Image (cartoon, rainbow, N blue to C red):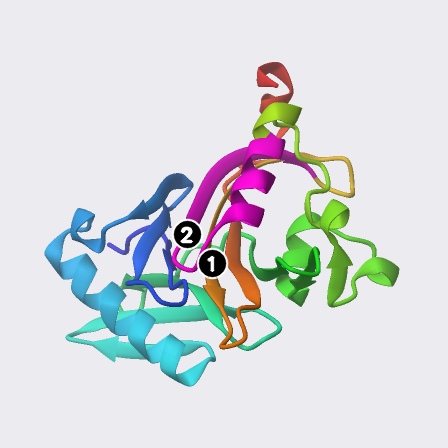
Amino acid sequence: MGIDRIVVATLPGSSSRLLARGRNPEPLSALTALDESVRETTIAGVARAVEQKTVSDTVHRGARVIARPYSTPQGIVTAVSVWSGAPDEQPPSELPTGAWVWDIDRGTCLASPEIHRVYRMPSEDSVVEISRAQSMYGVTAAAEEQEAALQAAFAGEPGFELTHEWKIERYDGRLRRMVWAARMTSDSDGHRWLHGITVDLTEGDGRSLLTSI
């Protein structure tokens, strides 16, 4: 039997770590949390996807391994979705996932096409560079929690990391449960970037979340 899809964060300047296992958040947990056989195929799939920056569908020690990288508009892979199972087994559907990067010093966000699809952003607004407000669209967390995350990000130094699980209302009005993680880097001139990945973990249409806001 195959396993649930695993989303592995590959944030720049850090080791690969879990972000989600199936619909269960595993925010930046060590890969040692996986069983040895699953860990081996996951590591192999992640390495190939990061190197090739394209979907990898191979066989590793008798198991079929499908790995899909998610890249920011700068071409940096911030996560890989991995599934392994029998060669004749049908893999489960992928969870909506997208990469992004905040330009900390300009206060804008560079959004990948995949993150626009996660949020169901209207096509006319699905441009690469969006405002900070657009990147925080639909977050239902308390204003204090949002402000704390923003302040931490804007004060962060290279190597600083953030991860949260938030309920977010997409542009189509659907409420979704999303987990995200990000890590700060800087250019040689000190310009700071917060590289991130977001995964929609919601089961079904999300209506059950309406009772728990």
Q: Which stretch is magenta?
A: 146-169
x, y (%) of residue 131? 77, 54
Based on the picture, tell me whether residue 158 belongs to the magenta stretch: yes
Q: Dividing the picture into quarters, in which one does residue 64 lie?
A: bottom left
Residue 16 is left or right of residue 155, and the answer is left
Q: Dividing the picture into quarters, in which one does residue 15 lie?
A: bottom left
Can residue 203 be spotted in the picture?
Answer: no
Residue 27 in the image: above or below residue 122: above
The residue sitting at 66% across, 25% down in the picture is 143
Q: Which mark is residue 160?
A: 2
The residue sitting at 84% across, 59% down in the picture is 125
x, y (%) of residue 44? 24, 73
Front-most of residues 70 and 209: 70
x, y (%) of residue 128? 73, 68
Disc 2, SS: loop
Front-most of residues 203 and 173: 173
Can residue 5 be spotted in the picture?
Answer: yes
Pointer 2 with pointer 1, Cβ within 8 A = yes
- Residue identifier under label 1: 184
User: Considering the image in quadrants, where does the C terminus appear?
Assistant: top right
- Tell me which amino acid carries mark 1: Met
